[in-house]
Image (cartoon, rainbow, N blue to C red):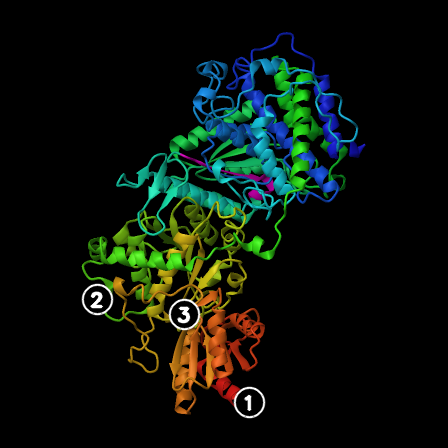
Amino acid sequence: MLSDVTTPQDLDDRFRETLAALPAAQQRRDPADPVTDDAPLTGAQVLDLFDAQVASRQLDLAGRWLRSFGEGFYTIGSAGHEGNAAVAAALRPTDPALLHYRSGAFYCQRAAQAAAEATPADQAQPAADTQPPAGTQPATGTPPGTGTQPVVDPQRAVDPGPAAEPKAADQSEPSEPSGTEPPTGGFAAYADAARDVLRGMVASSQEPIAGGRHKVFGRADLAIVPTTSTIASHLPRAVGMGLAVERLRRLDSAGRRTGAGVRVGSGAGAAHAPWPPDAIVVCSFGDASVNHASATAAFNTAGWYDHGKLRIPVLFVCEDNGLGISVRTPEGWVEATLRAKPGIRYFSADGADPVQTYAVAAEAAAWVRRTRRPAVLHLRTVRLMGHAGADAESAYRSPAELAEDLDRDPVAATARLLVDAGVATGEELLARYDETGWQVRRLAEEVLGEPKLASAADVVSALAPRRPMRVARAVADAAARASGPGAGARAEAFGGKPPELSGPMTLAQSINAALADGMLDHPQMAIFGEDVAAKGGVYGVTKGLRDRFGAARVFDTLLDETSVLGLGLGAGLAGMLPVPEIQYLAYLHNAEDQLRGEAATMRFFSQGAFRNPMVVRVAGLAYQEGFGGHFHNDNSVAVLRDVPGLVVAVPARPDDAAPMLRTCLASAAVDGSVCVFLEPIALYHTRDLYADGDGEWLAGYPEPGAWVAGHVPIGRARVYRVGSADDLTIITFGNGVRMSLRAAAVLAEEGVGTRVVDLRWLAPLPVADIIRESSATGRVLVVDETRRSGGVGEGVIAALVDAGYVGAARRVAAVDSFVPLGPAARHVLVSAEAITDGARTLLAR
């Protein structure tokens, strides 16, 4: 019957039947010896892998049990993928890992490795009991049972004590083992990991990484970075992490390296890279994800950099069960695809063979660690119990296919190896299995009573902390360094003529100078993107920065926004302060999930244990003359304002640009903020405000001594007063500031006093300033150069309504249209004339 091979109960029964049918070996093998004559693992080490696999399997069964009575909220399990325990064993517990959602055994194995490394040496077992014969150990990592993994007592392995009573037919009540001594030597090593996973399943607020916000595999002390993605969007981040790990490893010895980690910088936000210099990054994903654009971007970027001799030590692990929920992966497709990736070395192993998986994974990890180049391990697995609890495999798979997968159960395969080798009997292994099941069920019952997140404040507490006083202090400290001990280096970087002595600047020039000051104060800062280095950006904003700070800190990337942002995400996570550039706002939409689903969620799903500080510079908005069209005049920012916790800054004037950029850099360094610095293209080189040649849009660059007084906190607007400023409030941003000031000048000639409020920050909006300045006049004109639907103006009006504003209000906004080429753009964009007319209409009410 089909049901005989699909339910948790039947999977458990089949495993028991398999173990019961295994004939005992004619001769027992010492667990300290290799499990087979030429194996790289001892019997004790394979027993450790078995324990990790069993812990994962029992967690899957517990998840289904919890869900059966409405107490579990996550049933995507790892059954069939437990071979990844051997991958974990082949790595070091300090190698950062981004794991996909079928990584239970990897997680358990990594937790045991880390716990054993923390065990004092005098409590560890003698090496003679754990080391395989000379010449059989792969030259990488440390296998289970060699000082990083609790070792099963050889006596316990061959004499497990009284076997458990036969399991009752109802899987919801596993048998408690009989006898006075537990028949397992391994579960204690996995208890904490099991509790972590179970807490995630029941959304316990005591879950150590996400705190009940989501079920993820992650813990800072295990170097496991949480990822919620099921479709490879974490792969670009892995490439960025590899790039950063290698760049930090290559830093000179001028006080930037201490101990096992790499210290980066001494200025604001100086950070420790959290991993050893020779660490490699491991990133796992499923076979269906091979086809995703994010995966293609990551592979391509890793190969592109490798082709250019830039080293990126990343081990990709593709766990191939042949299915993407119900969609079959064509036979041979994954291998053909992965083998064809240029610059990425291909390894493959059978996930049902723990010895082969360990040996190949160890070889792959050693190669990546030695060469600092990317590789992929293609691990063939099966999927047991379907995609998730609600998945009815009978709709798309035959009984024969399901039975074939059961025959390749990796946990049963490990048991078969141990029994055939004479390390243990099937009865002994079943006793270990039952003991683990009983312990997991006991933990599941314990976590059921733990508290859940109790309020909206609890939920968002880890999202994006704001500590404005610390940010202000960081800016003040930067000013003190720039005018004090760093004055000489600053003068040298600016060629003896600091920007405050260069006279009035344009917006682009001010941003360039502020970037240079940022690079001086944040040694871990790096600027990268398409054309930013040799060319200096298509608008010259980064001109000269590569010459001043070198190609290691200012460099060009390939043309792929997903990869640009992924590099930034990984670099920030590794301890750098990345400042990637997206060449045009329209191009951001190709990669927006890297901000929404990856960048903004990091603190949320790790309670701040991990962060990816980043300041993304984006050239955008409309009004370019002589160079238009949708891709170079995009006025759509709704996708940015919709991302929780994201900071969105829009400087309009040169004298705002520098302090706002300093604030974003400080916020990223201090709070781990993800900031988007949206630069109005049409204002980059604008010089005049009211008349040609008036130079009213230029501004001087402040000397460091003036940085504190000119500090611009996140979420604070700027107000311009024209005339009496008592009759009308215009709320705007970006290009709208210049147009509104021109309109206000016309209105002043008509006796109308206007307040022009430059929002400066689109997220979070400066609500307090909006309410204060609106209430002062009782007439509000919102000038929104973005679209009428989904534009910034909607948020401003909503803020007024929520605050109980009772005055008059009106909007002038762009038409719901893409921006066309040439003069046609004037028909859909806001103009100074439209603002003046809107103000007159409002005043006439």
Q: Is residue 310 visible?
A: no
Tell which of 451 and 423 is nearer to you: 451
For badge 1, the amino acid type reads Arg
Confirm whether the magenta stretch covers residue 287: yes
Say which residue label 1 marks: 845
For badge 2, the amino acid type reads Leu
Quarter of the image with the N terminus in it: top right
Q: Answer above or below: position of 515 versus 772.
A: above
Tell which of 583 and 601 is nearer to you: 601
Q: Disc 3 or 2, which lies upstream in sequence?
A: 2
Q: Disc 2 or 1, which lies upstream in sequence?
A: 2
Q: CA distance from mark 1 to mark 3?
A: 39 Å
Q: CA distance from mark 3 to mark 2?
A: 33 Å
Quarter of the image with the C terminus in it: bottom right
Marks 3 and 2: which is nearer the front? 2
For badge 3, the amino acid type reads Phe
Q: CA distance from mark 2 to mark 1?
A: 49 Å
Taking the spot 39% from the left edge, 41% from the top edge, the residue there is 273
Marks 2 and 1: which is nearer the front? 1
Say which residue label 2 marks: 501
Q: Identify the element where label 2 is drawn.
A: helix
Tell me residue 620's x, y (percent).
44, 65
Residue lying at the far right in this picture: please name it.
1
Say which residue label 3 marks: 627
Task: Find residue 183 and report its image quarter.
Answer: top right
Tell me residue 408's x, y (percent).
66, 27
Magenta highlight range: 279-290
Task: Find residue 627 and report its image quarter.
Answer: bottom left
Q: Identify the element where label 1 is drawn.
A: loop
